[in-house]
Image (cartoon, coloured by chain):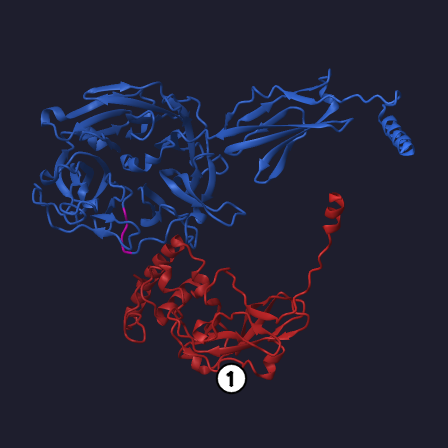
Amino acid sequence: MKIIKYYFALVMLCLLSACIDSRDDIYNELPDIEIANLESVPSEVLYNEVLYIDPTVKYGDSQDKEAFDFLWYKGVGSSLKLLSEEPVLEQKMDSLGTWNIYLKIIHKTTQLSSLATLSVKVNSQTERGWYVLKENAEGNTDLDFFKTAEDGKITPDAMADLIGRENALKGVPKGIMFTNNFRWKSPGSTSFTTYINTLIPFSEKEVGALRINDSKLMETTDNLFFEKSVDASYGFSGGIGAPQQALLLNNGNAHLMQAGMQAFLPAVFGDYALSPHFTLSNAYGSYILGFDELSESFIYVKLLSSSIFPFPQKQLENSRLSISSNNMKGRISFLENTDGSLNPQNTSYAQRAYAIFHENSRNDRSLLLGLDLAQIDAGQTTYGSAQFNPIMTADTLNYRVYPEIEKSEIFTLHKNYPILYFAYGNKIGSYSIEMIEQNRYKKEILAYPSEEKISYMHFIECMFDTNSFSYLVVATYTADGNYKIYRYKIAGNDVTQVGSPLTGRGKVKTIRYIAPSSSIMFYLYRYY
Amino acid sequence: MYAVIVLASCEQVELKPYEGDPYVGFYDPRGFYMKQLQSAETNFVYMDESIVRDTVWFKIVAKASIPPADYHVKIRAYKNEISYLTNLKEAEPGIHYVPFDSKEMEDFLILKKGHLYDSIPVILLRDPSLKEEGRRLTLRITDSEDLKASDRLADDDQSHTFVVVYMADCFLEPANWKYSSLGLGKYGPVKHQFMVEQSGERWDNNFISTLDRYDKTYYAFKFRNALVLENQKRAAQGLPKLKEKDGTDVEFS
């Protein structure tokens, strides 16, 4: 027993002595690498802004960045993409969405490392504001954009030439359409991205699809048709973007693009040549109302129409006229919608349009035709839905009485009242359709300096954004190649300018106000 | 003592290799149980006249064990009465396909040694009768001297899993024509040929299955327009409108 005790004591002694620190080996704990000065990094930036991050590094008592390697990464799916190896990150934020940024700092001598992560959301710069389709100095088509904040404040300096000078659409501008549901397969991708907010600007020769969020021109002309033109001879003259489909006129023929598609279908079959003037009712599934210059008839186009349809001759009971909408022996030079009913039997349906009609046999007057838009609303099963002739009224615009109207080439309607605005040279007048003769005509309500000629005028009513507005918008251009855009509030006879004019280079053809609102599609009809 | 007991209880167990019967079945690419596991189609109408044979392949899978040697696979044709199959007459051995018990097929109906998956062919013959109508060939696996059929839930043909081949040398209604919402109206061979000529596409099962709703809208537009032009051309030549053999007008609606 004694021997066992001695043996046990010896073993314990050996064990204990092995645990005593050697006086000659002192272990010094290494400090941690501390990364700081990341608190000031913004959590949100704008698309294409340069993000600047200058972290400080503390390692014990030292803050010498030279002692470290810096690796900046962006999380891409489940992998990491190296952004930079510099101590200071200067990164152009060139894609929308949330960027997960990782910083790894490695001490060069000890190879100790530390990691910091941060998230930065990249927001679009171009999702809210005024898009200006213009003719540039070369006679081609481009887009300027005036950014607008949620409170309506407009940044006066335009983001100019969004399509880009070298990519500008060839030929003079003709129009622009909007859809919230364009689909696109980006290069290298095997599937479509859908519901892309897209502008479709078109010139006389080309058409493009511009993604609004980042102003990327996704596709142009050939790739925007299921069947490309055999000889690449395109002649675009007009178009309209309805909620369910867009219609583009190519050499007088209608090509449709249903919401959700990526291209225009082959032309609607038939013998026709459509005028570039179209309008819609406020119904989401509204037919498109237009005019066929071949048959000289008002027509309508349904969703994915297999043909162009004329209206029947049957008149609504309360129509004061018997002017047929077919074989009218003339042409139209204007067509737009406004509020209000023209059918006393259907006053609850408050949608109408007016067209300026020129008879082939007369050059001393034109006719202002009032059209009942219930005829292009399939939901109006009793008094509408293409069962009747849409022409309800006709005002004679005698040029001897209204010489300024004869001189005018640009017209627009107030969207709430039946008031026609006409622009001639550098002046604007108004014609109140339902007022008595003495009070209805004002040959001049606005005038600009003589060097400014009016190139665009439209009543733009925006009810789909945080800052709603109703403005008469006028664009002028001068011989030195500049444009100005004016906005006016109209209250009765009062016309009040809002803000300062927006300015840019080129000649304005048309303007769209866009906002990131899902209800924008319900108000597209206001542009027509 | 407890430690000794615990230590003594740990021993390596040897896994014994499977020593039961080897099985084989047709591969199910969808991974859930349906009687029709695979299908194939051949239409000689798209091929040069000089081509008189074509082969379709069916994937098979070894079950229970990997074969240690080449095993013969036995398949049998039978008349299947399932309603969703395209209603065609049965193909006849030696006329429409090389019989499975022929010398030629012996070397092909094999599940090869060491293979979990393999493929077996069905060699189709371009018989003149296929110009008049298509034929259907339904196949099941049965027990061979080397392998058992893996589907043993039921042995009567109608309850068994199967693969099917469709063959023709004329335009045949694709199996997915009716339920693909093509918007092209009732099927007809003359219509089918017209569509092939206008689009350069086969408009068979495989092609139709690649179309989304917008592709279908495009083709509906395209064919409607093309048919109007075709009928105009025919009228100018004193010919009637394009019609099916039974006299009904070809229409896309």
Please name the color used to draw chain B: red
What element does badge 1 sit on? loop
Question: Pointer 1 indicates a residue of which chain?
Answer: B
Magenta stretch contains residue A467: no
Whether residue A64 appears in this view of the structure is: yes
Using the rendered view, name the quadrant where residue B81 is placed: bottom left
Q: What residue type is labelled 1?
A: Gly
A304 or A42, which is in the foreground?
A42
The residue singled out by tag 1 in the image is B94
Q: Report the residue that reaches farthest toward the top.
A: A61
A345 or A290, which is in the foreground?
A345
Residue B237, compared with residue A137, is above or below; it is: below
Per the rendered image, the range of residues in magenta is: A270-274
Most common SS among magenta residues: loop
Q: Which residue is drawn at 42% across and 22% down?
A: A155
Residue B206, compared with residue B52, is above or below; it is: above
Q: Percent x, y for residue A428?
A: 25, 25
Q: Percent x, y for residue A116?
A: 62, 27
Please name the color used to draw chain A: blue
Neighbourhood count class around disc 1 (C-alpha, 10 Å): few under 14, some 14–19, many 20 upward:
few
Whether residue A505 appears in this view of the structure is: no
